[in-house]
Amino acid sequence: MNELSNPSHAAIQKLADESPVQAQIRDERGAPRLFIDGQETYPLVAWSWSLRQATPWFRRAGVTMLQPVFGLNAAWPNPDTYDWREYEGVMASLLELHPDAYFLPRVLLDVPGWWRDRYPDELVQCAAPLPEDREPYRPIRRNPEGGWLWGLQRREPSFASTRYREDLQRQLRAFVRHMEASPFSSRILGYQIGSGIYGEWHYFLGQYCPDVSQPMRDRLGFVPDLAQRTTTTHGLFRDPATESATIEFYRRFHEEVCAETILEFTRIVKAESADRLLCGVFYTYLLENVFIHEMGHLAPQKILEADHIDFIASPYSYQASNVPGAARGAGGDVVDGGGNLLGRARGVGGDGGYRVLGESLKRHGKLYFAELDANTYLEPRPADPDGPDVSDVERELYMIGGSGTDTFDGALRVLKRDLGQVFARGNGGWLFDFGPVLNTKDSWYADTPITDLVSKSLALGKGRTDLDLTSIAQIAAVHDAKSLFVTQHTHARQARDSMCYFSSWFLDAQARAIHRMGAPVDCLYRFDLKDSDVERYRLFLMVNVFYLTDSECSRLREVFADSGATVVWYYAPGFVSEAGLDTGQMNELTGFSLEEIGAGPMLIESDADAITFGVDEVQSPRFHVTDEDVRDMGRWTDTGQIGFASREMDGYTSVYVGTAPLPPAILRRLAVEAGVTLWSDHEDIVVATAGTAMCVATSAGPRTWSLPRPMLRVGSQTTADQFDLDLETGDVELFT
């Protein structure tokens, strides 16, 4: 294979005497931390559609780590040649602008056009018909700084293709070796490896139900057709007694194809660098993922248990408003079927909620990078986002930061929240700047007030080395990925065709309310629950643990027995067993006598809270509590039967609720009854560790924030354990 290189750049020559950099993630003082050459470094990175344009502003802010994005398609012009010159030129030009910069490149495993033409049998085939109107169904834009292809194409390689994996592994191995042998080895900290849609390991063409190609059939044998994927035999659930083949396909598809492909490629980075480089991926988006059965990250345990993966990344929630007449775009208020405000993801007063389960990532020693991609006031608002003069990219990224980010004060509040959350949660983040490809034609950060705010955040972050980042949450939200193998497919819904019922209401919308409980909350996978968790968590929200084996049910009962905690079981805990549908297993798990009732609106009227909550959709199955010796907290609106109740069981309080999402008022009441100390007397956003805290006001007016110990209010000289403040919506306060 020919390899083309250009080591003559002046900026490259200046690196000749530098030693290779050593980057590590170490789990210390309560959280994974980034070390560069033995020194802890605050993990704030920056990317831009034009890094050459934005780097002077990043440098002014004090950001030293940059993330160029390299599409491997750009370095494989013909079957016999690898050409690394574009990548070298990008990094050399960035070093000329920022001589102290380090790089954490994102490497995309995309194939060039000639490969697609030569190997049509290795491409994804879909069970659903593709649109025939145009070749790309989102037009492709090639980033001039590394060849990243922004957009979606109809011809993409199958992850099951041996040729694809072997060809791209060979190229990735050659790329890493080349950079390791070059002067850039003193500045490259590691690589983020990506494939699938936008490099985020969402399966190519996911909305069209992939992959029925011959490589996939050779790999897995049985591959379900469209009807088998989109039909369930028991309402919202698949029945293992009759649909086991489809259930097993989804398990194997995610574990043996998607996750194994990730592991194969990421091992190369560690092997070729003798473990000197960091390696990470986009993965574990559970709390928000479109077309989750086909494009989701449903093999998290395999990825989290992989020692050679150091960091996990994702953008934070894009959930849009579901209020009729609300402005288009990410963010805005989200309400349930009873009209209760659940919260907002983006914009002023939003939670900026992470799509990953952060506590699980911590427990596996993975540093989390949150992608901070909110626009700023420098991005002009299009007069008509759907008008003929607006490009598809502008339409897709229209006011991506949410409400208020087109104003000076609003954009700074959102950026302070996003940077503050990185600091207070103990994770990393990167600034993601789409400005140069949109109307701005300049960086979203190209103004002194913005770079000053980033600079202050970096200064604060450098002091985090002395702080304990151990969780102090008293609430745990427990989720399950494998339950999605047995739930109704996205395409069975008409209302919101990119999100399945459970993704919409149990994961995404419920997260909005959880963030507004006014107290810290840890989110984790069921498989990460430990016996010791009951010693500090007083409230467990068992959000979607629908698909359980006998041993998994027994394990949960053992963990909670004699804990004194409160455990809230949502909807159908343990209803799906290995053998079939089993209300008996639900009863044994929860301690209630539950019986199935007919289809109806998923709405419960709670006299205890004087509200009606849930989803105004007719669904089945539903369940009601038949016991008489329970605390009746709510009844189905159509039948009057108990759908929300609590009782004492084996030394803890068991709560059953037949629908979701629970609004903040109910969650706060359950927390107080469980013995949780609320930090805020309002439904505010609270993020905290033992050494850090961030509170965000979700409304205007006076409030009291009560902290578990005296803490310094950042930006003041005041240290106290209670603060009485009069705030505006979206105001952010940090404490150490």
Image: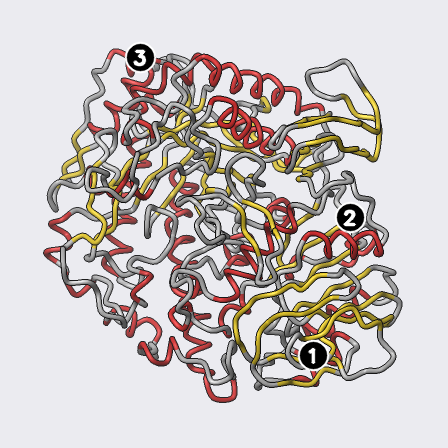
SS label for mark 1: helix
Quarter of the image for residue 574 reads bottom right
Q: Amino acid at mark 1?
A: Met
> Eyeballing the image, is 598 above or below 632?
below
Residue 562: image location, x then y, percent: 88, 65
Q: Is residue 577 visible?
A: yes
> Eyeballing the image, is 455 above or below 316?
above
Q: Where residue 586 is drawn, which disc sits there?
A: 1
Towards the viewer: 491 or 195: 491
- Disc 3 to disc 1, C-alpha distance: 63 Å
Q: Amino acid at mark 2?
A: Gln
Q: Circle 2 is placed at which residue position? A: 474
- Looking at the image, is mark 3 or mark 1 earlier in the sequence? 3
- Label 1 CA crowd tier, 10 Å (few <14, some 14–19, many 20+): many
Residue 250: image location, x then y, percent: 43, 71
> Eyeballing the image, is 336 above or below 188?
below
SS label for mark 3: helix
Does residue 245 appear to the left or right of 176 in the view shown? right
Q: Circle 3 is placed at which residue position? A: 96
Q: Where residue 82 is drawn, which disc sits there?
A: none
Q: Residue at x 80, y 65 (%)?
A: 560
Residue 572: image location, x then y, percent: 64, 74
- Looking at the image, is mark 2 or mark 3 earlier in the sequence? 3
In the rendered image, which quarter contains the C terminus?
top right
